[in-house]
């Protein structure tokens, strides 16, 4: 899926393009990022240093960024342990999030973000995985009562332009574009999402919702084994699909956490 943001630019949602950006999507794995700025910094650094840029060879990348952590939100069920999810229908955000939901015994449901509100209202789904930013923007906070803050996925975006269009530009115009690309703009976008995350979380608190926070979920006795199993399952799958550097990219993403703790 891509969204036009100008006459020559588009924003690509990597998670909506199944199998197209599997190395980039390792940044969504649990334990890597805890905020939009941190995730954006990690993703942009992986691109800048050549670890994932082969996935964007057909475009001229302006900048990459991520949302904040996607948490789990339910309408009627108070989720406190993995078994509470059994049998529920939860909207799957992306391939990484789907791996985690399966490990929790959830029935993942694919749908685009704009369809979530009506699906929750009609009880087609029991809940969803979304950052608090999206809970506010898509007004989903209005319909849910329970939130489980267990960071296990996030959303990825790439803002690109047509490579041929870029190559036809004069050196002076290219310099203007290059000077307004890369990490600087990755951080600008991420900071917008970070602000909205805080507003969405406060909105849920103000309406009296129940919010459970799982501290250090990768080492939590209930959640850690499932998240680790989901991580291994995802890495195994994309390695088997030919991305032999998957674990190296994952380890580098983990190593960038401290550098990108912005």
Image: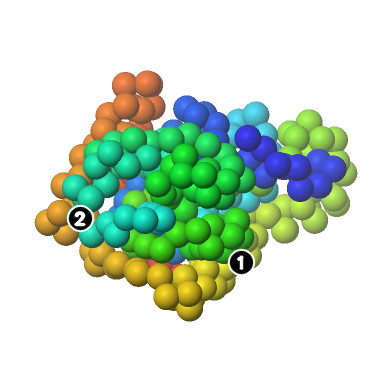
Mark yes or no: residue 203 visible: yes
Above or below, 121 relative to 105: below
Residue 63 position, x and y percent, is 63, 51
Quadrant for the C terminus, please.
bottom left
Residue 210 position, x and y percent, is 35, 69
Q: Which of 253 and 19 is in front in this view?
A: 19
Farthest bottom residue in view: 206
Which of label 2 and label 1 is nearer to you?
2
Q: Nearer the viewer, residue 127 or 182?
A: 127
Q: Residue at x 37, y 21 (%)?
A: 241
Image-quadrant location for residue 245? top left
Q: Which residue is drawn at 48% across and 78% down?
A: 206
Q: Distance between the residues labelled 2 and 1?
A: 32 Å
Residue 260 position, x and y percent, is 43, 64
Q: Nearer the viewer, residue 224 or 245?
A: 224
Per the image, label 2 sits on a secondary structure element best described as loop
For this view, does 182 lie left or right of residue 166?
left
Residue denoted by label 1: 192
Above or below, 21 relative to 81: above
Above or below, 26 relative to 234: below
Quadrant for the N terminus, please.
top right
Mark yes or no: residue 50 visible: no
Image-quadrant location for residue 166? top right
Residue denoted by label 2: 81
């Amino acid at each position: 899926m891509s969204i036009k943001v100008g006459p020559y630019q588009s924003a690509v949602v990597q998670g909506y393009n199944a199998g197209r950006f599997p190395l980039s999507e390792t940044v969504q794995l649990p334990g890597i990022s805890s905020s939009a700025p941190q995730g954006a910094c990690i993703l942009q650094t992986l691109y800048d240093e050549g670890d994932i840029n082969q996935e964007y060879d057909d475009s001229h990348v302006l900048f990459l960024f991520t949302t904040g952590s996607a948490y789990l939100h339910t309408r009627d069920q108070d989720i406190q342990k993995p078994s509470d999810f059994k049998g529920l229908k939860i909207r799957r955000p992306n391939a990484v999030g789907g791996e985690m939901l399966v490990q929790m015994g959830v029935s993942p449901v694919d749908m685009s973000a704009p369809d979530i509100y009506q699906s929750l209202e009609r009880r087609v789904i029991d809940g969803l995985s979304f950052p608090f930013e999206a809970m506010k923007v898509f007004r989903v906070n209005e319909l849910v009562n329970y939130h489980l803050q267990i960071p296990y996925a996030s959303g990825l975006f790439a803002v690109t332009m047509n490579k041929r269009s870029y190559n036809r530009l004069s050196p002076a115009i290219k310099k203007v574009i290059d000077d307004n690309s890369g990490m600087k703009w990755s951080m600008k976008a991420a900071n917008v999402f970070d602000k909205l995350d805080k507003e969405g979380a406060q909105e849920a608190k103000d309406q009296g919702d129940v919010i459970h926070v799982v501290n250090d979920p990768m080492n939590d006795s209930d959640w850690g084994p499932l998240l680790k199993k989901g991580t291994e399952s995802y890495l195994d799958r994309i390695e088997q699909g030919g991305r032999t550097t998957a674990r190296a990219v994952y380890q580098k993403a983990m190593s960038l956490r401290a550098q990108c703790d912005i």
